[in-house]
Image (cartoon, coloured by chain):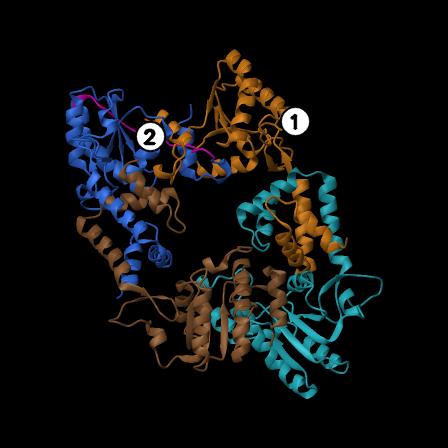
Chain colours: A brown, B cyan, C orange, D blue
Amino acid sequence: MNAIEKLVRKFSEFPGIGPKQARRFVYFLIRQSDAYVGEFKREIDELRSDITVCAECKRYFAKNGAAKICNICADGSRDRTALLVVSRDIDLENIEKSGSFAGTYFVLGGAVPVLDKEPEKRIRLKDLLALVEKRAANGLREIILGLDANAEGEYTGEIVSRSLVPLAEKHGIKISELGRGLSSGTELEYSDPETIKNALKNRQ
Amino acid sequence: MNAIEKLVRKFSEFPGIGPKQARRFVYFLIRQSDAYVGEFKREIDELRSDITVCAECKRYFAKNGAAKICNICADGSRDRTALLVVSRDIDLENIEKSGSFAGTYFVLGGAVPVLDKEPEKRIRLKDLLALVEKRAANGLREIILGLDANAEGEYTGEIVSRSLVPLAEKHGIKISELGRGLSSGTELEYSDPETIKNALKNRQ
Amino acid sequence: MNAIEKLVRKFSEFPGIGPKQARRFVYFLIRQSDAYVGEFKREIDELRSDITVCAECKRYFAKNGAAKICNICADGSRDRTALLVVSRDIDLENIEKSGSFAGTYFVLGGAVPVLDKEPEKRIRLKDLLALVEKRAANGLREIILGLDANAEGEYTGEIVSRSLVPLAEKHGIKISELGRGLSSGTELEYSDPETIKNALKNRQ
Amino acid sequence: MNAIEKLVRKFSEFPGIGPKQARRFVYFLIRQSDAYVGEFKREIDELRSDITVCAECKRYFAKNGAAKICNICADGSRDRTALLVVSRDIDLENIEKSGSFAGTYFVLGGAVPVLDKEPEKRIRLKDLLALVEKRAANGLREIILGLDANAEGEYTGEIVSRSLVPLAEKHGIKISELGRGLSSGTELEYSDPETIKNALKNRQ
């Protein structure tokens, strides 16, 4: 297999990319200047060398001197009483963009497929428990499960809360979930029964 | 304009139908038997003659002897303490299908476009107030605004609750709205800021 | 089943309409004035009474006095040497709109599903042969098969030309098919092998 | 801007990739092993070092010893009388996949936007003329313009043929274009006037 086909195969492994688009990527790269491709590779190296995992929330962040924790965990003005548990960095970033959460986060690093037998291989359960234990001493009062509203997210939520319950009860920490109901733009005519049920249950 | 073009124009006024599909409807009708078209017209007549508006909830229902109210309003087992206000019959039907509401309904008959000057021409405000007045005497405790989670639905909600407030306060009736948050299937990565804000505010 | 459900079921039989949209049609009709619905039914009646089948091309057209043939067949300025055979009236109208054909038409009234055993029940083969016989005496020189470029259209084309061949040879009439190749907007990167093959074969 | 944002920006320049998907690529790369990323970078290096431009058709191909021309141009069994001119390597590959062309190719390296003032900066006109001159001596009889059936492709076709005409006339080489008409799957009901016009003009 020649270099074109090899790279087509590699790009086909990228999220959401099929062979046709992978091929377009390859020809795009062929046509670029050495300078462009050099910069691209340098930026990949930087990504690997400059990005590290936050010792607290486990999100990826750009190294900053000897700092072991990310800017959010380091930010004294964030509310330490609330911890928002999300699956992926990209969820955290989208929530930050919304500007509607002032607490801190924990990134599980993924979700647990329904019926998966070894969840601890999919998500950072131990790290979460360790962080909660540590934060409990510093005023943590609530853990919010910020997971996708689909089967995988719900199964992940069950796994996470089940392992959190003992610790939560011991320290009097509340475990909550994101509210279910009508998301923006929802029309009742096209809503599924589950959404309607939640919207009614959570009316206010 | 000949009969084909006239009917194409008429079908083009049907919700969600463009001229191309309207034309396909016309040729579909041309090709049908007289019996088929006769039945079609009979069913339209029946729709007009057998369907009436419920004296209470204002939904359309099939006449049943001299009954003035629909099967839901007539059903003694429905919870009279809660009234769910919706825009359209189709919303009511979808909520009924979900089987998650045991109270009674009121159909506004539409929604109010943002900044519309004469809402009372768009929705049945007077009828709603009359029904609430009447129901107040019979134990009505809560009015739930079951409106679309979009600009039009929110504007309609403001109009409706503004006109309900005096009556509600007088009779100690609570006015609530459907819960906002993550609808089924929502992924946080793709959620808009408003939905995230609501999901956090309404966590539980 | 009440009048609403009956009509929902009927509209669901319209081409391309599912139960959800059928229901919206029904509520649309309920909300209209008696005048509107009366006009709608009148236009359906007109469609049935004023539209007839052209004795020559078999297309539907608005009756015009005692005229037995449509305006196209009656138009002395159309080229009588070429006959374009199409499946449906809607194909004929789209071709007329393009303004690129000056000859006359014949409407088969449908297409023949692949392997269908009784094509003569699907399309007007006898009528076509009769028209060709008659036109042969009046200078008909070419029959163009104007069928969809899909399996059904190709199978229909085989059936039609097979039954036309004897007559065509007898009268020295050429049978042709619409050109195959790149349709407007086609990008080679996304073209299927068949289209590329045709585009190369028919290059000019 | 940190390494994540830099690479998000870079991936956003890839064909058809928006910032959201670019970000998913970046997190995908962060999560991969060093081995995986190392291989990815190696494959990019190989692409740059092992892939070269064919001295004749200008397509990209994997270097093969000292070979200056690609396997197609080197293949003695290909028909030297026909040269198919395409915009991009990806078009050439798709045509090869169709197995319907036995001649050789020339890759322009792009297309010319309508009204673009300096086409020779967009496409390899000089190289094409040089190749035609050379091939003319070796029996070249036809140049086929294999360009997209859109405005850009047609404008590119005009530019190319205009500059080819003198040479073509001098050597008695025919210039042809891919056939226009119905591409596979086209339904007449939904065809644009241009396609119908071509399908009729190119009937056979």
Amino acid type for the residue under numbered disc 1: Lys
Q: Is residue A93 left or right of residue B7?
A: left
Examine the rendering and report whether any part of residue B101 can be seen.
Answer: yes
Tag in front: 1 or 2: 2
Whole-percent x and y of residue A128? Answer: 45, 69
| Chain ID of residue with mark 2 | D
Residue at the extreme top? C170
Q: Nearer the viewer, residue D176 or A178?
A: A178
| Chain ID of residue with mark 1 | C
Whole-percent x and y of residue A177? Answer: 53, 70
Q: On the image, numbered disc 1 is attached to which residue?
A: C121
Q: Nearer the viewer, residue C89 or A101?
A: A101
In the rendered structure, does residue C73 fall within the stretch colored magenta? Answer: no
Report the disc number at residue D163: none
Q: On the image, numbered disc 2 is attached to which residue?
A: D96
Q: Secondary structure at mark 2?
A: helix
Q: Residues within 10 Å of mark 1 (few under 14, many from 20)?
A: few
Residue at the extreme right? B65
Q: Nearer the viewer, residue C118 or A204?
A: A204
